[in-house]
Image (spheres, grey):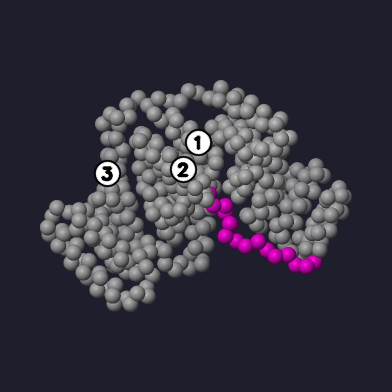
Amino acid sequence: MRVALLVFMLVAPGAAFAAVTPSPAAKAAFDRGERALAAGRLDEAATAYTEALSATPNYAPALNSLGSTLFKQGKKDEAVKHFKLATEADPALKLAWFNLGYAARKTSDFSTAASAYEKYTAIDATDPDGFYGLAESYKALNKNEQAIAAYESYVAKEKRADQQKWIDKAKESIAQLKAAAPPPAVSPVPVAAPVEAAPAAESLASLQARKLAEGDRFWGDKKYREASFAYQDAVNADPNNIEALFKLGNALAVLGYYGQAIEKWQRVAQLSPDEEVKKKATENVTKAQAKMAQAGGTSPQEANKPPGSGPVADSTRSQARQYYEQGVQLIVQRRYSEALQALNSCLSLEPALAVGYIARGSTLIGLSRFPEAAVDYQYALRLDGSLSAPLYGLAEAYRGMNRIEDARTHYQRYVSSAAADVRPELKADAQRKLETLR
């Protein structure tokens, strides 16, 4: 069974950094370079852009235009280098991503090309040219499913009358790739058969027991923050587990998150058939309400934020993001065990980073640890319900667990989503899987 990992490359590394503002001298040199480039005076343009960069280093438009000049001069490797520098200097400069994709494709560096086109189409989903370049890159990498989806996006978006030749080429490539594709695998277990759900249920039960034991160890060591995360994982695995809910409430209360602790204990009182457990949960609610009243309504805990969502030191956040970016790169290289270590470190430093849980879910899918991946995607949704990526990830995890109906439900939710992070090629992929998972 093949499980896609594309969805998890959602946040461009460095996207939070602001682009530099050029000095007057840099802007004047840049404008001079633009005029020279438009007139075909390439040497003059290169000199002007170099002057602009001397005046203002990391000036992204100048790096991009110098890359264009170098490409026209036949210096393709140097051009690729400058396009990369431009995207690093300003990850929002979409033209630099497009140019990087095009130049990398022309130098047969299809992996870099695909990554660049992915970024470009995420920034501008209306430009058909980006999807054609993405499809060509995927095709060269033998990523046929992704190539088909990208070609189909191109055909759907291409409305220019003078581009019919490229539409025809895209359709021809689609037909070739589909003809070469193996027939879809048929599950040997009927969808309705009780045996289908058994392995997933057992795996989730095992995961839950492990997380409860992990939380107990942290609690015994007075590591209450770590205990809360372990108990939260156990609750995510089974939202109705009374023991996990009660212990999570305890950990949250010790940390000062009284609102969340009350919610967990109230849930225990509703679910538990044991009168003594109900009584203890109700007593804890009363105590927590008193503590919350004493806080005066000024603490971040009273805002009912999840653990780790309070103030995080800039140095800590920077280190967490470095671990995140390292993890993403390791996922791309399919070094999943190392990626898991990096992302665990990331989330220990910034435990409310939703994209961190999404990336870790990708890693767990790569390791075929589907139940744990599902838990991470569910928690990412709790942290940021505006994201669509966890929906696709949950569908892939449930498909890996052979929970076909759950997979279909989440593929459909992704297809229907209007979230900003929805990706057309993944929406097409989800639609195809909906049609095959009967």
- Of the residues shown, which amino acid type is indicated by label 1? Asp
- Of the residues shown, which amino acid type is indicated by label 3? Ala
Sort mark 1 into few (<14), some (14-19) or many (20+) by Cα contacts within 10 Å.
Answer: many
Q: Quadrant of the C terminus?
A: top left
Dots 3, 1 in contact, CB < 8 A: no
Residue position marked by numbered label 1 in the rendering: 429
* Magenta stretch bounds: 10-25
Residue 216 makes an appearance in the image: no
Q: Earlier in the sequence, mark 3 or mark 1?
A: 3
Q: Provide the secondary structure element on which disc 1 rests.
A: helix
Determine whether 207 is above or below 221 in the image: above
- In this rendering, the label closer to the viewer, 3 or 2: 2
Determine whether 142 is above or below 385 in the image: above
Q: CA distance from mark 3 to mark 1?
A: 31 Å
Q: CA distance from mark 3 to mark 2?
A: 31 Å
Dots 1, 2 in contact, CB < 8 A: no
- Left or right, 18 with reference to 43: left
Q: Residue at x 28, y 63 (%)?
A: 261
Q: Which mark is residue 205?
A: 3
Q: Which mark is residue 416?
A: 2
